Amino acid sequence: MTSENFEFKVLATDGKARRGEITMPRGTIRTPAFMPVGTAGTVKAMYMDQVKDLGADIILGNTYHLMLRPGAERVARLGGLHEFGGWQGPILTDSGGFQVMSLAQLRKLTEQGVTFRSHIDGRAYEMSPERSIEIQGLLDSDIQMQLDECTALPASFNVMQKAMELSLRWAERCKVAFGDQPGKAMFGIVQGGDNVQLREQSAQALKDMDLKGYAVGGLAVGEPQQVMLDMLDVTCPILPHEKPRYLMGVGTPDDMLKSVARGIDMFDCVMPTRAGRHGLAFTRRGKVNLRNARHAEDHRPLDEMSACPASSQYSRAYLHHLVKSNEALGGMLLTWNNLHYYQYLMQGIRDAIEAGRFNDFFEETTAEWAKGDIAPLG
């Protein structure tokens, strides 16, 4: 199902958990949704057909990385990010603001935007709200994010307030720069650190801008999980019920399950791909560290009941060997396993909300994780 316009519908609710759909010209996004991260136009260690077959409806690209290499104008000349990377479904691009703050060298932040030097070659760049939207337009992404200032936690009230207020002014400028693009959307980003007052102020101001969707940013940046959940408890009730809510950069399966329970619809995180490349598998029995010597002669697969070949057709002993030998196939198989598990979890969440048994699913899933990897599978 597709639509010529960007549309979001809540199809079912169970408590605060929502089952919905975003329809747009390039496809339908079933929510709650996990978006695999394709930072530089590729979901690392995966073919795009694999990513689609796992159940992903949308992937994420990164404005900062793509503007540095190969360059947004070059991607545009080559047909846009969908044509360039071979993904025909919807793509969300983040604004590049987080990477500018965390990766770039010699940053200088002003009201106009941020000037910085590339972490790749030291070349100087300027990123304004307008330029961020322009780059995302050149990439031809379907959902574009406002440029914001993200602050690491802990931070002082004054630092968080200044960043939140600047982000609101930049959101207004991004909205003007984005204009009216049928079938596409620009999302605002709620900031405010770990302060209830600032989060409420940011969420209300963005709601008043009447954007097509809203993200919660500046979390999962080192603060305890409960702080993140407390901020969601404050923020989600303010955001419009009829608009999608996206928690940026989150997270672990546990983070996502608890965030869905608070009304979040969309997630992205590098964790499943990065963990896979470093020997860590996510399974229905929790995390499995394939670097651990106890797997060296373990004939069992990660999960013989899994529909993913990486999970069910390779022994832990072989995966351990690949990881310890730094063979590329090890990272490929574990990334495949991890992304499968994330999509399997999201499908389970969607089904549970539709059936009105999300709380039962929550308890069953966390109970399985608690059994740990040592317990017999079945």
Image (cartoon, helix red, strand yellow):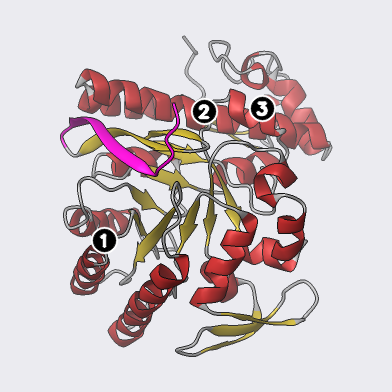
Q: Examine the rendered structure and indicate whether residue 228 appears above or below residue 47.
A: below
**Within 10 Å of the Cα at label 2, are there few (<14), some (14-19), or many (20+) other Cα atoms?**
many
Q: Identify which residue is drawn at 55% across, 15% down.
A: 306
**Between marks 2 and 1, how big is the CA–CA gap?**
35 Å
Closer to us: 303 or 340 = 340
Q: Residue 210 — which label? A: 1
Secondary structure of the residue carrying tag 2 is helix
Circle 2 sits on which residue?
341
Q: Is residue 13 magenta?
A: yes
| Residue at x 57% of width, y 25% of height | 54
Rendered location of residue 90, percent (x, y): 53, 41
* Residue 365 point in image, percent of width and height: 35, 26
Which residue in the structure is indicated by mark 3?
50
The amino acid beneath tag 3 is Gln
The span picked out in magenta is: 1-15
Residue toward you, 153 or 68:
68
Q: Nearer the viewer, mark 2 or mark 3?
A: 3
| Label 3 SS | helix
Q: At numbered mark 1, what does the secondary structure look like: helix, strand or loop? A: loop
State the image coordinates of residue 335 (x, y, percent, origin top left). Answer: 65, 35
Position of the N terminus, as image quadrant, is top left
